[in-house]
Image (cartoon, rainbow, N blue to C red):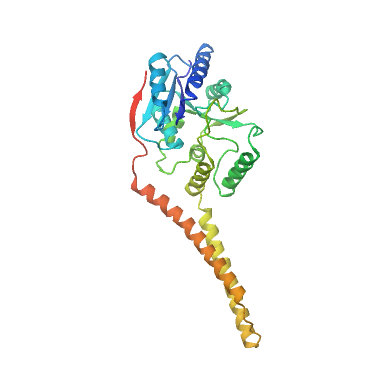
Amino acid sequence: MAAVVYLVVPCYNEEEVLPEASKRLIAKLEGLMEKELASKESRILFVDDGSKDKTWELIAGLHESTPYVCGLKLSRNRGHQYALLAGLTAARELCDCAISLDADLQDDIEVFDEFLKHYQDGCDIVYGVRKSRETDTRFKRGSAQLFYKFLNLMGVEVLYNHADYRLMSRRALEALSEYKEVNLFLRGIVPLIGYKSAVVYYERHERLAGKSKYPLSKMLSLAADGILSFSIKPIRIISSLGFLIAFCSIIALLYALISKLCGAAVSGWTAIVVSIWLLGGIQLLCLGVIGEYIGRIYSEVKQRPKYFIEQFLKK
């Protein structure tokens, strides 16, 4: 029996992309139905993350004119991770499995077939992983490699070259709903579920239109969420650094005392100034890292709602 498949597509100011993206997704979904990989109840769920352009109007129009498009409108912009979670949560009770992807269709939708074949073979999670980054600029390629290597170094379990292009079964979606944290990093949460998984490799395309909604600042923020939400290694590094500095201070104190007793004390204004600036910088850096953890604890303990749904258009 064919599965009920929901394609969950977060959107933020995507009016340039939506007409062509919806056309291609509808055609692909109909193709999956013909191959009996998806049932007739399958849908495309566009999630409007508080867009300021005509994104929601386009989604509402598609909902009226086509039988396969649903729409979910958040009350305000909450960011890609929250929009994706809102879509997956809404789809959980309506589907057998959900495939998440971005509206720009840089992720190759032709591998949906492989996703669903792995699902039929019993996989609860299927990850879409890029084969290469040859189409990226040198800076973006280098920063992405640094991003994944640094996350792994900090103890965060992520798949290299995997973003948020994946299939999740209803069972996996129900497990995902058990994670209540406010500081979302889905790339780190999903591997923790631990159900049977598979990997599908694909080539990434250019955007259909418009500009990327993930500039360097948002990528750095996402990296910080990933590290600080899943690892305490930075705290341990600070502790180790504290012990190292304390040890060096004891050595320096002994050296100063011996020099004084031997009558070889020399004025060292430069060394004193450099050491003060160095230790002051290290202390401020350590306080900043600790402050980031405290800030995230503060966000978690308030337990505020992650988002509010203003409107849900479903078939």
The residue nearer to you, when weighing 313 against 278, is: 278
Residue 92: name its quadrant. top left
Res. 86 visible in picture: yes
Name the residue: 47% across, 19% down.
Answer: 3
Task: In the rendered view, tell whether residue 80 sits above or below residue 285.
Answer: above
Name the residue: 51% across, 41% down.
Answer: 188
Point out residue 118 in the picture as x, y percentages from the top left corner. Answer: 56, 24
The residue nearer to you, when weighing 49 against 193, is: 49
Residue 184: name its quadrant. top left
The residue nearer to you, when weighing 262 against 19, is: 19
Is 131 positioned to the left or the right of 85 in the image?
right
Point out residue 248 in the picture as x, y percentages from the top left corner. Answer: 60, 71
Task: In the rendered view, tell whether residue 214 sits above or below residue 277.
Answer: above
Task: In the rendered view, tell whether residue 249 sits above or below residue 87.
Answer: below
Point out residue 235 in the picture as x, y percentages from the top left corner. Answer: 51, 57
Point out residue 274 in the picture as x, y percentages from the top left corner. Answer: 59, 70
Image quadrant for the C terminus?
top left
